[in-house]
Amino acid sequence: MSTFHGEPQAVPWHRLETRDRGLIIKPDKKHSFTAYVDADFCGNWDRRIAAEDPDTAKSRTGFLVKYANAPIFWQSKMQTQFALSSAESEYIALSTAARFIKSIMYLLEELQERGIEVTTVPTVYCQIFEDNSAALEMARVPKVRPRTRHINSVLHHFRNEVANRRIIIDKVDTEDNQADILTKSTRYDLFVKHRKSILGW
């Protein structure tokens, strides 16, 4: 997804080859689930073809899920519905990530209940990092607003988990959001920073 912006010509070609690279995993048993979520509002918008292809007005969701601080799942895909604001596109991404996370949290708890040894902290929870303040507010505060009323029934499915502190949603600076490279082109230095956080190299 991501392309190299900035000064890609300054990077030796052999350093861009990744066929011999892998995923360096260093599990940390103190962590349960963590996730980074991002969205690119109308990132593919192109006025030249918008009349023929309305899908250019759709936003992109990207999220990364880690367990014990090791990446286990990531996704970058176009949203299936049209978001009317950047806050809504971020909230759709947050809801999409939470839907996946809830299912694996329940699976892990069921394994524990059946006596299968799972190395994790006693309480299964997920800390989700989001960089959009409006999306954070919608997720944390159970309030229906006139401008977000239309997304109430579809996207608020994880509110109980947030209220019970099983899903904890925290603010993260945009430059520290590891899911940023899953939604848009980034500066080369940011790409390398996030790649190292995710892949370990």
Image (cartoon, rainbow, N blue to C red):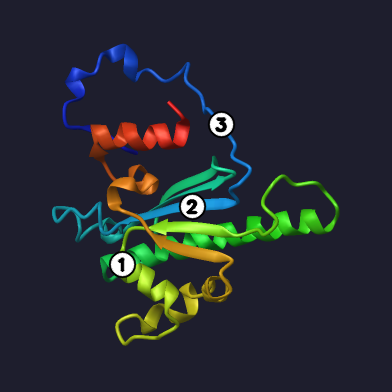
Is residue 151 shown above or below 166? below
User: Looking at the rendered structure, which numbered label has been put on residue 25?
Assistant: 3
Which quarter shows the C terminus?
top left
Q: Secondary structure at mark 2?
A: strand
Q: Is residue 149 visible?
A: yes
In this rendering, would 106 be left or right of 147?
right
Of callouts 2 and 1, the N-terminal one: 2
Q: CA distance from mark 2 to mark 1?
A: 17 Å
In this rendering, would 35 be left or right of 137?
right
Q: Could you tell me residue 162's position as x and y percent? A: 52, 71
Which residue carries the number 1 mark?
133
Of callouts 2 and 3, the N-terminal one: 3
Residues marked 2 and 3 touching at CB (< 8 Å):
no
Q: Residue furthest front?
A: 30
Three-letter residue code for mark 2: Ala
Q: Secondary structure at mark 3?
A: loop
Q: CA distance from mark 3 to mark 1?
A: 31 Å
Q: Is residue 83 visible?
A: no
Residue at 18 percent across and 19 percent down: it is: 10
Q: Residues within 10 Å of mark 1 (few under 14, many from 20)?
A: some
Q: CA distance from mark 2 to mark 3?
A: 16 Å
Q: Secondary structure at mark 1?
A: helix
Which residue carries the number 2 mark?
35
Q: Could you tell me residue 1's position as x and y percent? A: 34, 39
Closer to the camera, 26 or 145? 26
Residue at 55 percent across and 63 percent down: it is: 99
Three-letter residue code for mark 1: Ser
Residues marked 2 and 1 touching at CB (< 8 Å):
no
